Amino acid sequence: MNVFRSKLAVVALTAAISSLCVPAHAATKTPPKHNVILFIADGLRHGSVNSVDTPTLNSLRSLGVHFINSHSIFPTFTTANASVMATGHMLGDTGDFSNTIHPGYAIFNTGNFSKPTGTLTPFIENNQVLADLDDHFSGNYLNEETILSIARKNGYATASIGKVGPAAIFDASQLAPSGKAFQLPTTVIIDDATGSAAGVPLPAAISSALIAASLPTIAPNRQNGAAPTSQLSNGFSGNNTTPGTLAANVTQQQYFVDTLTKAVLPTFVANGEPFVAVYWSRDPDGTQHNQGDSLNTLTPGINGPTTKLAIANADNNLKQILDYLTANPTVAANTDIIVTSDHGFSTISKYEVDITGKNVVNDYASTFTYKNLSGVQEVNTGFLPVGFLAIDIAHALNLPLYDPDNQVLAADNVTKVYEPVDPTIAQQTATVRQHSGSGNGVIGGTGSIPASGESADAKVIVAANGGSDLIYVPTHDAATVSAIIAVLRKQNYTGALFVEDSYGPIAGALPLSTIGFKGASPLPEPTIVVNFKNFALDSANPSQTRVEIADSGLQEGQGMHGSFSRGDTYNNMAAWGPDFKKGYVDPAPVSNADLALTIAKILRLPLPANGTLTGRLLSEAFVGQRGSSYSPVFHVSESLPGDGVRTYLVRQSFRNIAYYDAACILPADAADHTTHVGDEVTVNPCD
């Protein structure tokens, strides 16, 4: 009976989507401006979409355009991909290199939002942090016009709703503070922080519309009404002995989709305004990170029942948006819907992994026992602790290590400094940590907190992110850079290395320019990017069974992204609406960097550019345009050999645009893997 009802639901949904294809009856001499809804299902893998788990997403890509060769941008993190979706530029132009970066100064060092000077490695899924970056970088840290900004300036009503951080990035300049506080934006921004001191103010008309729709003006958190440490709370991640959440982010996302369909879009439509709206679903990402199905084991990993709940949650959100359009056929006839995900996902391994996928442990950080303030062991014996990369580099360079996210009193009991980190002590104390709290590290120097206009005295700064980390060398000392690369080449957790171009060819590493990091951004670029080792549990289905080492406080068996594998770069992309072909499967490579130019085309607006690292217009997907006959081929670049290994980069190319599939470290003499280097091949050697 349940199966029969499920089939009926899919049939009804397909009919509902198809009904939206009926054009408006009113004829006009000038075609109406088309609306755009961009729906992002955070962390949704391409292979997770099917008729059973995601009937709405599956129907949309079956009836519209299915981008079967889609790509996330590396590093495969949320804000990085939000920046390229919003601007159409690669990371070298946007400067949003990862979720955690070193912006060249200590955040809030001018007192924005009445905050004291903080970390050198801010986590930028935070509106106040984004606003502070804007304030330091000429009012728009991205240095590029976003698609919502250009739409807003040309008479479109604009909104961005969902996950805090990436939602606001779509109109980042609206966050630039005035008088050290948020100004009232024109674009509607509703996210986790809405209604709080950390939230972006709402226009009066939208606040009134929310109240009229019986919706609160304060966003709910991720607890689903449960206690913070309950497995019913989506925000509960557990620890090394307690499994994390068993619930999807239902309550919060129901609020977000209600604000869009019951308040924001009705207001836009009632005002007769064409609109561009972004909806960013935190699920399945948030649930996949915290899921409690697989504590300390790789199976089922992120393929368990809790992840399925999260995928269904995102699918239901999209269905509610489509239902709104179905009920408003005139609006539907002029509305394009583009679906994407910022990245894929992998299961976390806390062991180092050699090139065969065998678990091994040989680094410095994993040899210690880590205990919290209460003396409880918080890292399983032999597992990699969060912050292992910073610990290993500091040890190899024989330099002190500090946690930039925590401050303690200096010896004078007046001045604050970054908290020292020493893995050799018996347990964490009130003034010294065994590992940094979030994995970030300040290496060398005194641990002093730089004031406004000052530079840190650190020799090395590590921004930990998960499946890959960023390393900054503020002194630009070539010997230090070479020494760090030499250390990382020998670590079994290293999966690929990229180094800033000015240091020239370095054995074992490829230049940053090969992955689009050298551009027009005023933010400091990292000196070294470290991709961590990853492997597939099932060689017949590698993108859906990927496992990666992660510099994260999450546990073995939970979920992470950020690495350079098809598990993380293979996202889900589709499009449907009056501008797009029906039932078209696009074989050409596409990426999140192609979305802004494609949306700008729909809006009939130019998209100004400062940098040149852009995506392309997805013209083959448009009605009346010639389709693509592309057959996937891969191009492989290799580094110089070093310590018996090379970094290999695998990409595709289409219309002079590079699409990055994967990168890996392989033995330098692995002819069986790499006889095709420099040639076009049909098999990804890093899978």
Image (cartoon, rainbow, N blue to C red):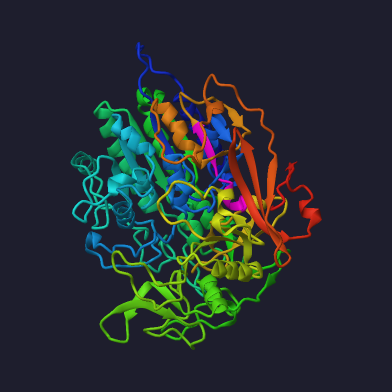
The stretch drawn in magenta includes residue 574: yes
Residue 375, by quadrant, is bottom left
Q: Where is residue 192 in the image (x, y as percent from the top left)?
A: 33, 54
Q: Where is residue 543 in the image (x, y as percent from the top left)?
A: 64, 51
Residue 624 in view here: yes
- Count of numbered badges drawn on the protein: 0
Magenta region: which residues? 565-575
Residue 647, by quadrant, is bottom right
* Quarter containing the N terminus: top right
Q: Work out which residue is located at the far right of the displayed protein and give it.
A: 672
The stretch drawn in magenta includes residue 412: no
Q: In this view, does 544 lie above or below 171?
A: below
Look at 40% across and 35% down and name the residue there.
Answer: 37
Foreground residue among 459 and 496:
459
Residue 8 in view here: no
Q: Position of residue 623 (x, y in %)?
A: 52, 21
